[in-house]
Image: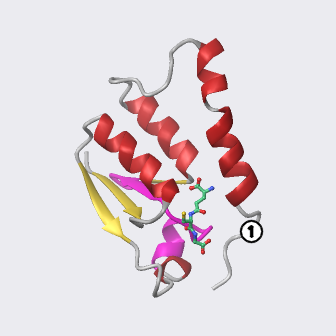
């Protein structure tokens, strides 16, 4: 299985996924999206991520975007080493701050990105 992460090195949302890939020692390929050239807002990238944002993960034809679902996917498919507490009483509070950050500052748009 090959994990490919479309990302940008300055993107904190990308970085949280890169950290998980490294901590979990998941072999992966980083594909830098040329955001200065707005490649994230045009095809073929929009076909992968209709929101036109990084990061986007690809694994053997499976495509996932939005950093929180990507992190949840990596945790579910590669549970060791765990990056979140197994105890639900600890797990959910530990996600409060990152979830607030994602929802308040860069929530997923309702509609696909305009070019
Ligand atoms: N809610 C998204 C936020 C992703 C996001 O906002 N990424 C920024 C870079 S840090 C981006 O791609 N911005 C490009 C744009 O909005 O045009 C996630 O968690 O993945």
What count of labels does the image hold?
1
| Residue at 67%, 48% in the rendered image | 101
Judging from the image, the colouring scheme is secondary structure
Q: Quadrant of the N terminus?
A: top left
Q: Is residue 58 above or below residue 48?
A: above
Q: Which residues are magenta?
A: 44-62
| Residue at 77%, 63% in the rendered image | 110
Q: Quadrant of ligand 1?
A: bottom right
Alpha-carbon neighbours of circle 1 within 10 Å: few (<14), some, or many (≥20)? Answer: few
Give the secondary structure at mark 1. loop
Residue 31, given in percent of the width and then of the height, sits at: 32, 66
81 left or right of 13?
left
| Residue at 50%, 64% in the rendered image | 54
| Residue at 62%, 67% in the rendered image | 51
Q: Quadrant of residue 106?
A: bottom right
Q: Can the viewer see residue 107 in this picture?
A: no
Along the line of sight, the residue nearer the viewer: 80 or 101: 101
Badge 1 is on which residue?
Answer: 111
Q: Is residue 48 magenta?
A: yes
Q: Is residue 44 above or below residue 103?
A: below
Q: Quadrant of the C terminus?
A: bottom right
74 left or right of 99?
left
């Amino acid at each position: 299985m090959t994990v490919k992460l479309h990302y940008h090195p300055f993107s904190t949302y990308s970085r949280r996924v890169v950290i998980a890939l490294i901590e979990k020692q998941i072999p992966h390929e980083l594909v830098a999206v040329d955001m200065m050239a707005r490649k994230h807002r045009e095809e073929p990238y929009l076909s992968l991520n209709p929101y036109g944002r990084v990061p986007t993960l690809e694994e053997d034809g499976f495509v996932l975007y939005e950093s929180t679902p990507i992190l949840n996917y990596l945790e579910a498919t590669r549970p060791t080493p765990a990056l979140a507490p197994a105890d639900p009483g600890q797990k959910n509070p530990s996600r409060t701050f990152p979830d607030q950050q994602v929802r308040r500052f860069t929530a997923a748009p309702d509609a696909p990105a305009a070019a």
